[in-house]
Amino acid sequence: MVLYWGTFKKQVIAYIWDSTAPVGTTEKISPPIPFMAVHAVVVRSGDKKLGKWVTETRNVVEDYKKLFGSKVKEVQAIRIQINSQHTKSEAESYWRSVRFKAQP
């Protein structure tokens, strides 16, 4: 999942399921688009849960603070994608819903 925040330079968090990187790994990515700052966060790793429905819960406000050092103002977009073209592999994904909610 890729989350976009409203600034001139788009600040993006990419939540990923990686095949080998440990859960919790974060990395700044240099995209080919010059007006984007992208940080990847590994939320799943390996093939243990392949073929099963998985629920992920993230505190995107806290993730944003840790990665970009400031408070998030607004989410402008959500994008769900598979990047198997980069790994020369095949992948398939399904999702039921994406929800944002305030924490009590």
Image: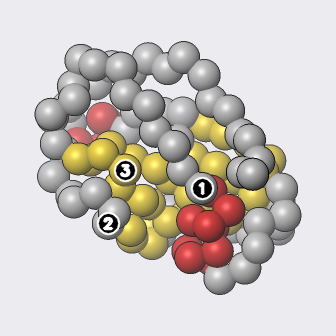
Q: Determine crowd level at label 1: few under 14, some 14-19, many 20+ residues with C-alpha closer than 10 A.
A: few
- Give the mark nearer the N terminus: 3 vs 1: 3
Residue 34 in view, yes or no: no
The picture places residue 78, in percent across and down from the top left corner, at: 67, 39
- Give the mark nearer the N terminus: 2 vs 3: 2
Q: Determine crowd level at label 2: few under 14, some 14-19, many 20+ residues with C-alpha closer than 10 A.
A: some
Residue at disc 3, secondary structure: strand
Give the side of residue 58 with respect to residue 34, left or right: left
Residue 89 in view, yes or no: yes
Give the side of residue 52 with respect to residue 20, left or right: right
Q: Residue at x 20, y 36 (%)?
A: 88
Q: Residue at x 64, y 49 (%)?
A: 3
How are the colours assigned in the image? secondary structure
Q: Determine crowd level at label 3: few under 14, some 14-19, many 20+ residues with C-alpha closer than 10 A.
A: some
Residue wearing tag 2: 25
Which amino acid, mark 1? Asn
- Callouts 2 and 3 close, C-beta under 8 Å: no
Residue wearing tag 3: 43
Mark 3 or 1: the one toward you: 1
Which amino acid, mark 2? Thr
Residue at disc 1, secondary structure: loop
What residue occupies the far bottom of the structure in this picture? 69
Which amino acid, mark 3? Val
Instruction: Give the total of numbered labels.
Output: 3
Residue wearing tag 1: 59
Residue at disc 2, secondary structure: loop
Q: CA distance from mark 3 to mark 1?
A: 12 Å
- Give the mark nearer the N terminus: 1 vs 2: 2
The picture places residue 102, in percent across and down from the top left corner, at: 77, 48
Q: Is residue 40 above or below residue 87?
A: below
